[in-house]
Amino acid sequence: MYIPAEHPASALIAIGVDASRLAARAGLAIVEIAGRDSVAAAVTAVRERGFTTLLPTSVATGTEYGDECAPETASAYLAELLGEGVDVLPAVRLGSPRLWAALNGRFASVIAERFRIASPCLACHLYMHLARVPLSLLLGAAPVVAGERDTHGGRVKLSQASLGVDACGRVLARAGIELLEPVRRVREGEEIAGLLGPGWETTARQLCCVHSANYTGLDGEVAFDELAYARYVHGFLEPAGDAVVDAWRETAEPDYEALIRAVLEGPGAA
């Protein structure tokens, strides 16, 4: 189950937290809980920025399967790892199927034809960042910590390619929110493992996605047209994110499909 991303106060009520009191806390950050990289990012953010209160968040995409308790398990491990000096709050789960559908489903054929690149993972990462925007704004534009990495031992994940990650950062900045990516430059998994400690592999599980590795070839390698990807980011991904952020200033539940259609039909469309 998830709480609608557009109504973050309900998510805080569900875990027994008062929004105004939480917003008043110094050292507050919203942290992504999606797997080991995100937990390592939370640890690094605490060390580098001195956060003392963390609100763990996961985002429902409708494409996941596996242990539904994985985000809560990871949050509990994070709390144990950080110790008494950091207050790790109960995890909240957010979601917006209509937003996901508008970004990834409804116009998939149009996007593939226009930009010559297609993967549901591309805009899904933007969706997950957007889903935390209303919560962050409710909490006084609390910074958001996420675990994207430019490379995973030399392997690139299309959803975490540099241009897309940079664009997501700009979209959140448009909303007045700082997106922190403290492990972005970490290349090797051994360094991530070092941040997590020896207990991670035996205590935590990560939800899987039905679209996993959809952008790899038969040999398992990632190969994509970098120019097409750049056109997609600048012609669709970032403008779509900006449109959603701007619409939220007017209403909590805009017509996402109409917003994304307008992006694709607008004068700035590639």
Image (spheres, helix red, strand yellow):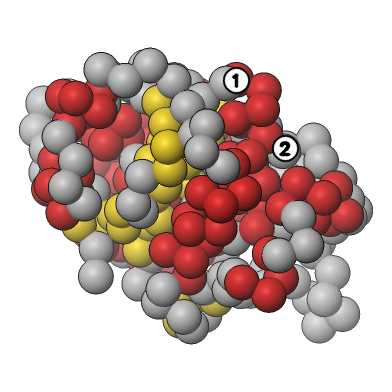
Residue at the spot 42% in from the left edge and 37% down from the top edge: 87
Mark 2 nearby-residue class (10 Å; few <14, some 14–19, many ≥20)? some
Instruction: Out of 204 and 168, give the one closest to the viewer.
Output: 204
Instruction: Out of 223 and 48, give the one closest to the viewer.
Output: 48
Amino acid type at mark 2: Arg
**Which of the labelled discs sits on residue 184, or is there none?**
2
| SS at circle 2 | loop
Image location (x, y in percent) of residue 98: 22, 59
Query: Residue 38, can we see it?
Result: no
> Which of the image's four quarters has the N terminus?
bottom left
Image location (x, y in percent) of residue 179: 51, 28
Vertical arrangement, residue 114 with respect to residue 31, above or below: below
Residue at the spot 48% in from the left edge and 58% down from the top edge: 76
Image location (x, y in percent) of residue 51: 51, 25
**Position of residue 33 in the picture relative to residue 148 (left or right):** left
Image location (x, y in percent) of residue 159: 62, 53
Query: Residue 119, can we see it?
Result: yes
Vertical arrangement, residue 123 with respect to residue 267, above or below: below
Residue at the spot 56% in from the left edge and 42% down from the top edge: 83
Choose the circle earlier in sequence order: 1 or 2: 1
**Which of the labelled discs sits on residue 49, or is there none?**
1
Residue at the spot 42% in from the left edge and 63% down from the top edge: 72
| SS at circle 1 | helix
For residue 118, which quarter of the picture? bottom right
Vertical arrangement, residue 265 with respect to residue 38, above or below: above
**Position of residue 249 in the picture relative to residue 84 (left or right):** left
Amino acid type at mark 1: Arg
**Viewer-side label of 1, 2:** 1
